[in-house]
Amino acid sequence: MKHLRTIAVAGLFAATIMPAAADDISGAGATFPYPIYAKWADAYKKETGVGLNYQSIGSGGGIKQIEARTVTFGATDAPLKGEDLDKNGLVQFPMVMGGIVPVVNLDSVKPGDLVIDGPTLAKIFLGEIKTWDDPAIKKLNPNAKLPSTAIAVVHRSDGSGTTFNFAYYLAQVSDEWKSKVGFNTSVEWPVGIGAKGNEGVSNNVGQTKGAIGYVEYAYALQNKLVYTKMINKDGKTVSPTSEAFQAAAANADWNSVPGYGVILANQPGAASWPMTAATFILIPTKPQDPAAATSALKFFAWAYAKGGKMAEELDYVPMPANVVKQIEAMWAKSITGSDGKPLHVTAN
């Protein structure tokens, strides 16, 4: 698929989407949305001449950089709490949604061949299920030829919003995980090999027989990794698709949490993918460089208005139009220059 090859090539250049120019928009953070940010950046550059210099360094790094004001915006998949936003003079808003998927490296197993549920996934990442022919996995996959190969767990080594959402989900479905590990952008992993970014986990799983890891769905596709199906909160077996991600997000009450910080993991609904997540932008309420912040808001507004189809092509889910309207109204109210005037003016 052409669009995936294009993003995969961009990903090989790792940290930044394109060389920075003086008028480029600077951002840093989550690797989860990197494929769609790269695709949007390419289209926006062609249309406007303005580039995006985005460092795909993980949510933890993005939070640190925006708090230090070394970039125009930060990006995180682990939403900040209201008090942290206020303390650091930031606003937060969701940019796009997607799915986190378990990925495996087993001979003769194709994407979607295996089914896994949350409790079993938790036991694998706790180190309690050690081989692929474990009875718990065989029970979920009675017709699969499962080898006695040792399971090689691959997890993130950096501060990661993907980890936050993955661990949050495991804490929802496993009391043992909740008490022993919990959830955060970084956790104390009981077992496994650490790798940096969705890119690093993808590469490690792809190169290690018997491996299992967790990545954003676009990374599974672009790296031709074998993803599993999952059993959701309603007990239904579901595949990772944009429809399943949308189903999980359908009932989200974005106004219920400061900074729209809704967590979409383990949502009810027969069609819902259990590890769905939003990715968020962080930007100062009073930017040090108002012109740069204005450029960033123009890019985000363009992405909301024109980037939906591109997002869907990579199996991300665009934000609903009514939520976008609320977000842009919030920009006009909350993000101002030194003169107190809004940096973004909503269309009538």
Image: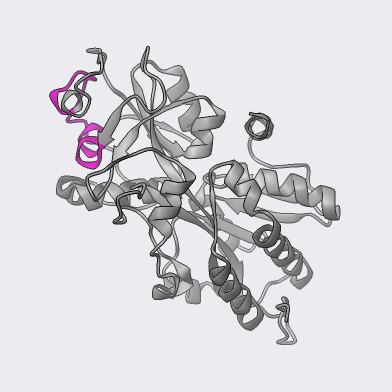
Is 213 placed above or below 84 here?
A: above
Q: Is residue 145 left or right of residue 256?
A: left
Q: Is residue 314 left or right of residue 40?
A: left
Residue, x 56% and y 64% (percent of image)? 67
Q: Residue furthest bottom?
A: 340
Is 317 placed above or below 227 here?
A: below
Query: Is 2 inside the magenta-drawn segment?
Result: no
Q: Is residue 167 left or right of residue 298?
A: left
Estimate the x, y position of residue 144 in percent, counting from the top left: 25, 18
User: Looking at the image, which is closer to me, 234 or 100?
Assistant: 234
Number of numbered discs visible in the structure rendering: 0
Estimate the x, y position of residue 189 in percent, counting from the top left: 29, 39
Is 333 placed above or below 17 here?
A: below
Quarter of the image where one finds residue 325: bottom right
Estimate the x, y position of residue 167 in percent, counting from the top left: 32, 47
Residue, x 39% and y 20% (percent of image)? 105
Q: If the image is split into quadrants, where does the C terminus sit?
A: bottom right
Q: Is residue 21 visible?
A: no
Q: Is residue 230 left or right of residue 79?
A: left
Residue, x 36% and y 31% (percent of image)? 228
User: Looking at the image, which is closer to me, 335 or 264?
Assistant: 264
Q: If the image is split into quadrants, where does the N terminus sit?
A: top right
First to last magenta residue range: 117-136
Estimate the x, y position of residue 73 in percent, counting from the top left: 63, 61
Is 13 placed above or below 29 here?
A: above
Q: Is residue 136 visible?
A: yes
Residue, x 68% and y 30% (percent of image)? 2
Query: Is 130 inside the magenta-drawn segment?
Result: yes
Q: By what rule are the colours in the image chosen?
A: one colour
